[in-house]
Image (cartoon, grey):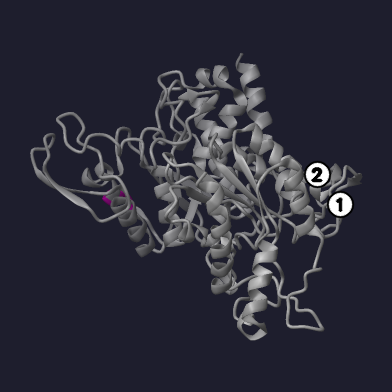
Amino acid sequence: MKTQLLFALFTVLSMVATSQAEDSTDGKVPVILFIAGDSTAASYDNKEQQGWGGVLQEYFEVNKVRIDNRARGGRSSRTFMTEGHWQKLITDVNAGDIVVIQFGHNDASPVNDSTRARGSLPGLGEESRQIDNMLTGEPEVVYTFGHYIQKMIDEVKQKQARPILISLTVRNLWQNNRIERGSGEYGAWLHSLAATNGIDYIDLTNEAADIFEHLGKELTDTIYEKDYAHFNETGAHIHARTIVNWVKGLRPTLPSDSYSALGQDVASNHWAFLRLPVIQDKQKPTLFLVGDSTVRNGTADGSNGEWGWGSFLADYLASIPVNVVNRAIGGFSSRTYITGNHWHKSLNMMRPGDYVAIQFGHNDASPVNDTRRARGSLDGIDSQVQTVFNLLTGQQETVYSYGHYLRQYISDAKAKGVTPIVITPVPRKLWSSDSNTIQRDQSAYPDWATSVAESAGVPVVDLFGLVANQYDRLGITAVEALFADKHTHTSQSGAQLNAQIAAEQLSQYLMQ
């Protein structure tokens, strides 16, 4: 059984990402990587219970990166501070160090009782509650989870060190063959704090959940020997390897010689720096967005003045009880979003009753095979195929038509009980030579997308046509301000316009 478990483990880990050259930065040597967390990260002399921080040093050369694990069992973000553990940690932090912060498992405990008195108030606001602590016998002002984490972030930055927020480890709780993806909303709150502060976020919850679901409940049960929250040494390595996989994809990242032989064996999730969002409120259905940079540009921070419309969609759907989770990634086509495993990861997050809006086309016209992107799909919506030796991946690949890939998104979503909504690609700023109107024959992708959606009997939003009509009404001068580059990527105002138009159309399907 153990051999079978390890074989399955390393098989799935090898699927996480493919290694490629990494950017590295010069800095202090050794870097001290501090860990602030609870029992799921703490070190133990017990193979039946081991936190991921207890094995993390095995993945790094100690003379390059030294792990200083300060995680303590039973602590919340609040009690890690009030008991003095945080102050001791931050006192030892120097410029150039890394501080990894992971809390949440214990923050949902009672705020005041005679056994732990460790809970924080929920949320990210500045609410507070005055209590007479039944455990310490002292008066105390208790703050929100977000307050405590923000204080940690601020103090790490003051030391000119690098904070990294990590979502919760996975608990061995299953329903309908799906493992729980995070306790409460703590992962979403950590993501929000990371995005607001412009710092790194590692989505350990969803990545580890993917691995455990691949292993299955029977094998996962052998990893959680003690209880549903705490794992053995194998589980510690699963979580630690996932963290290393993400650390390698952050920007800037550690030099490649920072890793031990075990660490070198871990692939790089080279899109980790994007801070892709997660579900915010598990009580609501979720609208997922998948697409390219016209939907989510870079890290969705307005770099170079460029924004995707998905970054503002939630603002125009505020009256509808739905999460908006924008998983679009710049540079991808309908083909490479699937072959790059991004569709699989997004699909794994979806639940019955959710929605997924699908918009591709801008990058599908790229070369089918080259050494830079190799991202093009075959023209049309028919069943034609082309077998290539992919010059980018070094692997043989069967490439299908644009329509084939759209049908796969639709089919996969339906199989999960998720409603697919096809969206035609937004128009480029290309004006007709004989009139002040947007070229309607820029590409065939809007027509192909519409045809596939209608044949599949799923909703379609003709964002291309609707936005083009609005550009015509506004005129050349006004539309110029809606773009941040020559003709493809919108500015903030352009993205907001597209988002408003998209929301008006999407709302009719979300309210059914």
Q: Are marks 2 and 1 in contact (CB under 8 Å)?
A: yes
Residue 60, located in which quarter of the rendered image? top right
Res. 170 visible in picture = yes
Q: Which residue is mark 1?
A: 378
Residue 138, located in which quarter of the rendered image? top left
Q: Where are the magenta residues, as a range?
A: 87-91
Identity, as a three-letter code, of the amino acid under mark 2: His
Q: Residue at x 71, y 37 (%)?
A: 411
- Across and down, in percent, residue 75 comes to 29, 37
Q: Residue at x 66, y 59 (%)?
A: 330
Which of 148 and 263 lies nearest the eye of the viewer? 148
In the rendered view, would you say 64 is above or below 266?
below
Residue 132, located in which quarter of the rendered image? top left
In the rendered view, would you say 327 is above or below 330?
above
Label 2: which secondary element: helix
Separation (CA) of disc 2 from disc 1: 9 Å
- Across and down, in percent, residue 204 comes to 51, 41
